[in-house]
Image: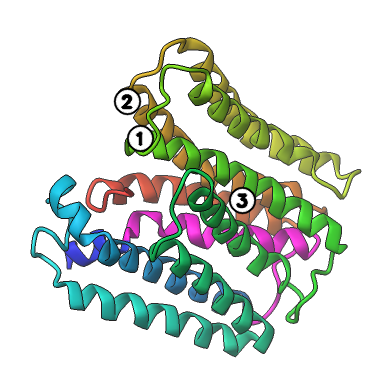
Amino acid sequence: MLALGRLLRLSLAPSALADVAAGLVFANHGRWPAGPGPFCLMASSACVYHGAMALNDWHDREHDAGTRPDRPIPSGKVAARTALALGVSLLVVGPLIALVHSPGAALWSMALGLVALSYDLGGRGAWLGPLLLALCRAGNLGLGLFFASGVFGATIPFQQALVAMVLYGVFVLRVSQLGRMEDGEDADLAGPKPKALVLSAALMLLFVPFLPPFGRVGGILVASAIAWPAAFSLVRLARLRADWTRADVERAMGLCLRRFLIFSAALAARAWNPPAFDALIVAALILSGYLISARLRRVFPPS
C-alpha cells in the first residue's frame, strides 16, 4: 500500500483538490456552490490527476530502472501491469464521476485526461512538456471555474475566468521548466535562466490579488497577505544566487511546488465577498492542505 501511495504521489492530492475548490468559489462570487456537484468535480480531478501519475511512472519504468531504481515499479514493489491497470482505471473513472455533475464536466475531465496522457506517453521536450503540464493544471482550475454554476459557463464573465487560468498556467509553465533543470534535462545552470524562471513564477503570485473583479478590497488584502510573502521568498532566493547548482535548483523547486497551494488559497481568498465567508473558509482549508502535504511527503515523495 505504501508503494502504491508513492506511485500515485498521494502527497500531491491536496494540490489537485485545491485547484478545483479555488475555481469553484472564485467563479461563484465568493460562495461555495450548493449540492454534491462540487465534490464530484473534486473527486473526478483527483482520479485523473493520480491516474496520470501512475501512467507516467509506467511509461518511464525502463528509464527509471537505470536512474531511480528505488521507485515503485523498478524496485518491484508494484508490478508494471498493476500500475498500468490502476492508471487507466482512474482516468476512466474520473470522467464518470464528473458525469454525475454534468455531461459538460465529464467532457472537460476527459479532455484533461487526454492532455495528461499525451504528456505521459511522449509529450516531453524543452517547451512541449512544460506546456502540457501547464495546460493540465490550468484545465484543472478551469474545471472549477467553468462548472461552478452546474453547467458550462462560469457565473463570472468568461474573460475573468480565462485570466485566472492563464495566470496559473504561466506559473505552472515556469515551475515546470525549472523542474527540467532538477532532472538534468536542461543543463543551462550557469546562465541567468534559473533566476529568470524563479522570478517569473514569483511575479505570477504577486499578480493574484489584482485579478478582476475589482473593488473587493477585503479580498485583495487577504489574497495579498497569502500570496506576497510566498512570492517575496522566491524573489529573495533568486537574488541570493548568482551561479546556480543542482542543489540550488532542487531547493527552489521545493519552494515552488509548495506554492501551488498558496496560489490556490490566494485565488480563493481573492473572491471574498462579504457578508459570505465561504471564500475565506475555502482558502483556510487549502492552506491546511499545506500541512497535510508536508506530512504526507515524508511517506510519499512528490517527485
The residue type indicated by label 1 comes to Glu
Relative to residue 260, is residue 112 depicted above or below? below
Instruction: Return the residue nearer the eye: 180 or 262.
Output: 180
- Please, is residue 149 above or below residue 132 in the view? below
Question: Is disc 1 in contact with disc 2, using a CB cutoff of under 8 Å?
Answer: yes
Earlier residue among tags 3 and 2: 2
Circle 2: is it few (<14), some (14-19), or many (20+) Cα within 10 Å?
Answer: some
Q: Are marks 1 and 3 in contact (CB under 8 Å)?
A: no
Q: Is residue 121 above or below residue 87?
A: above
Q: CA distance from mark 1 to mark 3?
A: 30 Å
Dot label at residue 283: 3
As for residue 13 lying within the magenta part, the answer is yes
Q: Which residue is mark 1?
A: 182
Residue 288 seen? yes
Q: Nearer the viewer, mark 3 or mark 2?
A: 2
The foreground one among 216 and 55 is 55
Residue that badge 2 annotates: 246
Residue 222 can be seen, yes or no: no
Which quadrant holds residue 196?
Answer: top right
Instruction: Tell me the residue at 26%/62% (across/down).
Output: 7
Question: If you read the primary sequence from the N terminus, does the residue marked by circle 1 or circle 2 appear first?
Answer: 1
Q: Position of residue 47 (x, y in %)?
A: 43, 74
Whole-number angstrom distance, CA of label 3 to CA of label 2: 33 Å
Residue 110 percent across, percent down from the top left: 55, 79
> Amino acid under label 3?
Ala
Magenta-tinted stretch: 9-36
Q: Residue at x 45, y 59 (%)?
A: 123
